[in-house]
Structure formats: C-alpha cells, structure tokens
Image (cartoon, helix red, strand yellow):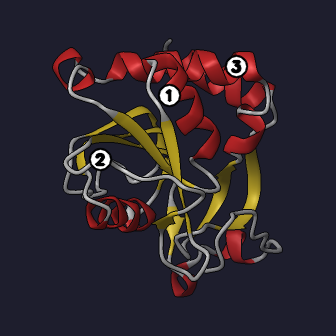
Amino acid sequence: MTDDDILAEFRGSEALLEGHFKLSSGLHSGHYLQCARVLMNAERAGRLARALVQKIPREVRQEIDVVVSPAMGGLIIGHEMGRALELDALFLERPDGEFQLRRGFRLEPGAKVLMVEDVVTTGLSSREAIAAVRREGGNIVAEVSLVDRSGGQADLGVPFYPLIELNFPSYEEGELPKELAAKPVTKPGSRAA
C-alpha cells in the first residue's frame, strides 16, 4: 500500500479533516485525522492492519506474543492488528487518568508486546501506555501506528513503525498563525487537553 493509497482511504472515508483543531496532545492544527472514520469499515480496517503488519520487520513480528493498544483511539486498529498477526489483542483504559489493564486482561510476566496506536503526534499517550504495560510485567518490542504526525520526532523509547508519516504542522496555543487563529477551534479527540 503506497502513501497515496493510504491517503485515499482517509479521504474516501472523510477521515482527513481541515479546519482548526485542538489535538489530544494540546497542540493546534489545521488538519485532523479521524481514525475512527477510516476504521469504521471492517474491510478497510483489515486492509490497513495488513499493510501495517508489513511495516514491521520479520524478526520483530516473530517475537510478538500479544498486541496491546490504548483506548479509545488504538482500540479498533489494535484489534485488527491482533487478527492480522493471529494474536490476542488487549486494550488499556484510563478510568482514573492513568492507563491500566481492566476487564480481566492480564499479561504473562515478560510477555513480548506490540503497542498499537492510531496517531502519534508528540508520543505522550504512547509513552504513558508503554509505562502501563511495563508496570503490568510486559516487555514492549515495538510500537506501530497508522499515522506518525511527529515528523519523525516522537521518542517512544522503542522501535516505531508507522504506516504513514504526515507532516501537517501543529502549533502551541500562543504560536498560532493568524489564519488558523481566525477559525473556530474544534476538539475532536478522545482525551481532554
């Protein structure tokens, strides 16, 4: 799957939005990727997951015992990655603001985990999710995401394999370009920032 194919999937599902958005990271952008829309079709979600599996080096794929993703954003693609890899897929939740396994999910001590996200912008949520897996006794072998918005700058502390890298500019609150600041802001993400 080429970058153009991937972007066509986002555009075709109306998942690539333009306007003024406050991202879950707290940054502002003129573009937002609504991964829930691109993943709402099971066939499309499966295609994207299979393409993402191909981004993971074979030797890393062979190590993975289980897939873990943070809810909400990573839940669907995490599940599809579990299906594509023929592995169980667990998810983390934040009932009290900190990621944790719930619903009877648990990791075997030393389990080799693939962390799966939808979008990485600053890497904060990923680092928090990785820390939670480590607290639960898991060992992160790599992280994957549908989209890397960090410009390759997110330091997750583990190997990182995004399906696509998109360089949409993002801005701190006090550094908004005039044309972006003039537009009403929308907060479409799943986390309060």
Q: Is residue 92 left or right of residue 59?
A: right
x and y percentages locating residue 8 in the rendered image: 68, 21
Residue labelled with disc 2: 108
Residue labelled with disc 3: 44
Residue nearest the viewer, comparing 16 with 44 = 44
Q: Quadrant of residue 102?
A: bottom right
Q: Vertically, is 129 above or below 185?
A: above
**Element at badge 1?**
helix
Depth-wise, is mark 3 or mark 2 nearer the camera?
2
Residue type pointed to by label 1: Met
Q: CA distance from mark 3 to mark 2?
A: 32 Å
Image point (58%, 82%), residue name: 96
Residue type pointed to by label 3: Arg
Residue nearest the viewer, comparing 118 with 131 = 131
- The answer to whether any part of residue 167 appears in the image is no
Residue labelled with disc 1: 81
